Structure formats: C-alpha cells, structure tokens
C-alpha cells in the first residue's frame, strides 16, 4: 500500500451540552503510515479517544476531514474487553466473522488461529468469567484481529491491568503487530507503553486536543530487554518533559 492508511486533516470536534459548547479536538493533523504503530498520549480527557473514534468512523468531526479507504478493514479494541458472558472464548472471538456472514466452521477455525496467536488456545472453551483480566484482554485482541484488519485501533486496552501483566501484553502485542504488518493507532496514558510500542509518539495538549510534539522512536526491536536500555529511559524522560510543559502552559 502506498501513502498513509489514514490521514487526518485539521480535525476539530465540538460537543454541545447543557452549559454550551465544549471543544474536544482543536485542529489535529495526523498520518498513519502502513505497518507502523502511532501512539497518542496526553492528559485524561484531552480528546485522544475522540480522535481515534473519528478515524474509525464511530464519530464525525465538526470540521476537517479523515481520508481513509473505506474498504480497508478495521479492528477495534477498547478499554474493556466487552466479551459476551454466555459465549465461550472461541465463540466470542469468532463473533465478528459470524456477523459478517461467514460459515460457523470457517469462523471458528479463524478464531482458533487468532487464539493461538495470543496464547489462549487452552482457554478456548472457557467462559469469560473463568479468565483472568489479562486473559480477557488477550481474547479481546484476538477478536479484533480475527477479521484480518489492516488498521487496528486500540483505546487504552491494557489500562486496567497490573503493571507486570501490562508489560507482558505490550511485548506480545509488539510481536504480533510487527509480525503481521498491521497499521496501529494506540491511545494510552502510559509513557512506558507509548515508548515501548510506538514508532511515532504524538503528545497531545490538554483539551482541546492539539499536537504539542511528535517523537520518532528509534528502537529496532521491542522485547523485555528494551526496558533496561538507558536510551529507553532517556526517551521516556523526553516525552514526560513535553507532557509536563503542556500541562504547565494550560491556563
């Protein structure tokens, strides 16, 4: 694929409430290059998730535009796994294909392949209530991948997990994404996660969301050893400094 998978041009979003209009996104330009992970990081409530939802077609901009081939398949994974409690893990993962009209045999075979990819083959017949939080999020990632998306939108998927589990899932996600060539947009509040996963880290201002700075992340491999690399710590500090400057500049 030549050119960006998705491009955002002067994106703005205003919400109307009882107290008047609230500007959530104040002019954002963004390009998602094929096979890369772009990370949006910023303060809580700054509009990061709004940008992601607009790119995915779940919301519409007030002005500006999103340029994206509508035939490019998209996968979503949100802050909660949102698994159907009465369906097995396998059937939860297969659900997008079943809804798309694929045969049950084909859908379950594809689900098994994605469950193997996220290390959940032995839990395929369990119900979601029988899984740990990390396992439920693995199942949600498998479901997002089962339709073979070329664009994967991740809205803080590991935010509610303990740090050790989150680190492990970040490592697994990095291996999966870089092994498949999927283009990813990730929203996170974690500086460590942003620097570990991202090819580009985009720092957002407090609401309304604007881009303060972009960091190109130079690390060729993303594994557990990277977290002990002095350059990894340096990059985290650079991102943190920009985030702090953005907060201090807010009136």
Image (tube, helix red, strand yellow):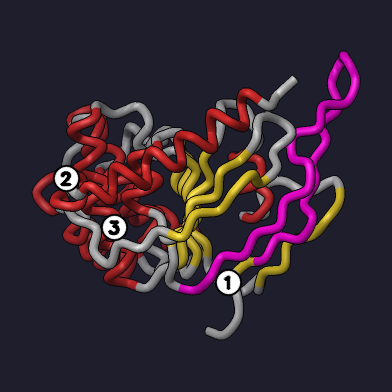
Residue 183: x percent and y percent? 46, 66
Mark 1: few/some/many CA within 10 Å (<14, 14-19, 20+): many
Q: CA distance from mark 2 to mark 3?
A: 17 Å
- Which element carries disc 1, helix, strand or loop? loop
Residue 131: x percent and y percent? 19, 32
Q: Of marks 1 and 3, which one's residue comes earlier in the chain? A: 1
Q: Check residue 174 in the rendering and tell me which mark sits there, or answer none.
A: 3
Magenta-colored stretch includes residue 95:
no
Please tell me whether residue 166 is drawn above or below residue 6 in the rendered image.
above
Residue drawn at 23 percent across, 40 percent down: 167
The residue to which callout 2 is attached is: 228
Magenta-colored stretch includes residue 10:
yes
The residue to which callout 1 is attached is: 5
Q: CA distance from mark 1 to mark 3?
A: 19 Å
Residue 64: x percent and y percent? 83, 56
Give the magenta part as a residue range.
7-34
Residue drawn at 47 percent across, 70 percent down: 150
Residue drawn at 32 percent across, 34 percent down: 86
């Amino acid at each position: 694929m030549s050119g960006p998978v998705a491009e955002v041009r002067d994106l703005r979003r205003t919400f109307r409430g009882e107290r008047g209009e609230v500007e959530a996104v104040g002019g954002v330009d963004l390009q998602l290059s094929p096979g890369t992970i772009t990370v949006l990081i910023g303060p809580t409530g700054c509009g990061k998730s709004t940008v992601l939802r607009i790119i995915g077609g779940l919301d519409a901009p007030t002005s500006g535009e999103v340029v994206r081939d509508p035939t490019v398949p998209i996968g979503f994974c949100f802050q909660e796994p949102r698994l159907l409690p009465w369906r097995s893990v396998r059937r939860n993962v297969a659900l997008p294909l079943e809804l798309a009209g694929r045969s049950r045999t084909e859908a379950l075979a594809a689900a098994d392949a994605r469950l193997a990819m996220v290390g959940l083959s032995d839990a395929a017949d369990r119900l979601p209530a029988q899984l740990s939080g990390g396992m439920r999020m693995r199942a949600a990632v498998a479901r997002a991948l089962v339709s073979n998306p070329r664009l994967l939108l991740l809205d803080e998927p590991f935010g509610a997990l303990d740090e050790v589990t989150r680190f492990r899932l970040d490592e697994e996600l990095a291996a999966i994404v870089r092994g498949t060539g999927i283009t990813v947009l990730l929203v996170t509040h974690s500086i460590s996660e942003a620097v570990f996963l991202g090819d580009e880290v985009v720092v957002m201002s407090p609401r309304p969301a604007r881009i303060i700075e972009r960091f190109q992340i130079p690390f060729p491999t993303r594994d557990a050893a990277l977290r002990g690399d002095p350059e990894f710590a340096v990059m985290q500090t650079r991102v943190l400094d920009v985030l702090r400057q953005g907060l201090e500049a807010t009136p």
